Image (cartoon, rainbow, N blue to C red):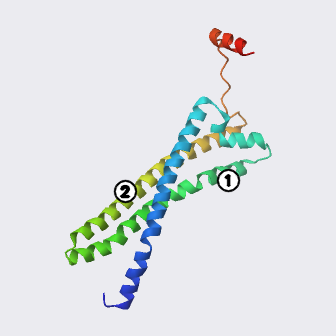
Amino acid sequence: MTNPIESAMYVASQLFLYPVLIAIALLFVHAFYALGAFAWQAWQRHRGQPGGFELATARARNPALSLIDLEALATKRLEFARIATRVAPMLGLVATMIPMGPALMALADGQLADVSRNLMVAFSAVILALLAAAISYAVVNVRRRWYAVDLAVIEQGAPVLPPAPAPVHDPVAALAMEGVQ
């Protein structure tokens, strides 16, 4: 690399390796956090608990919220994960390409250990980025459907939350409650 422009571009690209790797790691951690929150919300929805129905809960707290306000709330709730589904693969590609330059230079010099190390970083980063994107994509799409259904039900004026299940008489629980009182 005798050309100063090529040298400057190479040096500049190498400066981005660690920030990109850190961003991928953060997106990967966030994807699993989002997956856990999604699983919790799915469980709450399955059980008919208000926490699983964010839009209905927001409307119950503030009946003045319009459908547009609720749509904005749903969009806000989905925004970061939706962005992550698009940004993570891009960062994975960047994290793949940055170590390729040093790997090719090491290959030309016969330093196979450096080639291996750089390729390991490149492929590990893209794998984590794609996993983060895939998890975020699944969470976003299911939540988007939930919110669309909830908004349609709210628009029709029907209750979003399912009715509470009828209490079941449990003689053992009744005896236990008598002992507590």
| Left or right: 169 in relation to 28 | right
Quadrant in the picture for the N terminus: bottom left
Which of marks 1 and 2 precedes in the sequence?
A: 1
- Seen as rendered, the residue at the extreme bottom is 3
| Left or right: 160 in relation to 63 | left
Q: Position of residue 166 (x, y in %)?
A: 67, 18
Residue position for label 2: 127
Q: What is the count of numbered marks? A: 2
Q: Position of residue 55 (x, y in %)?
A: 68, 43
| Left or right: 136 in relation to 176 | left
Residue 96 in which image quadrant: bottom left
Residue 117, above or below 53: below
Query: Which residue is painted at 71% across and 47% down in the image?
Result: 67
Q: Where residue 156 is drawn, which disc sits there?
A: none
Residue position for label 1: 72
Query: Which residue is painted at 45% across and 53% down in the image?
Result: 132
| Label 2 SS | helix
Q: Position of residue 44 (x, y in %)?
A: 60, 34
- Mark 2 and 1 residues: CB-CB less than 8 Å, in contact? no
Q: Amino acid type of disc 2?
A: Ile
Residue depth check, mark 2 versus mark 1: number of the one nearer the observer: 2
Q: Nearer the viewer, residue 77 or 35?
A: 35
Q: Nearer the viewer, residue 106 or 81?
A: 106
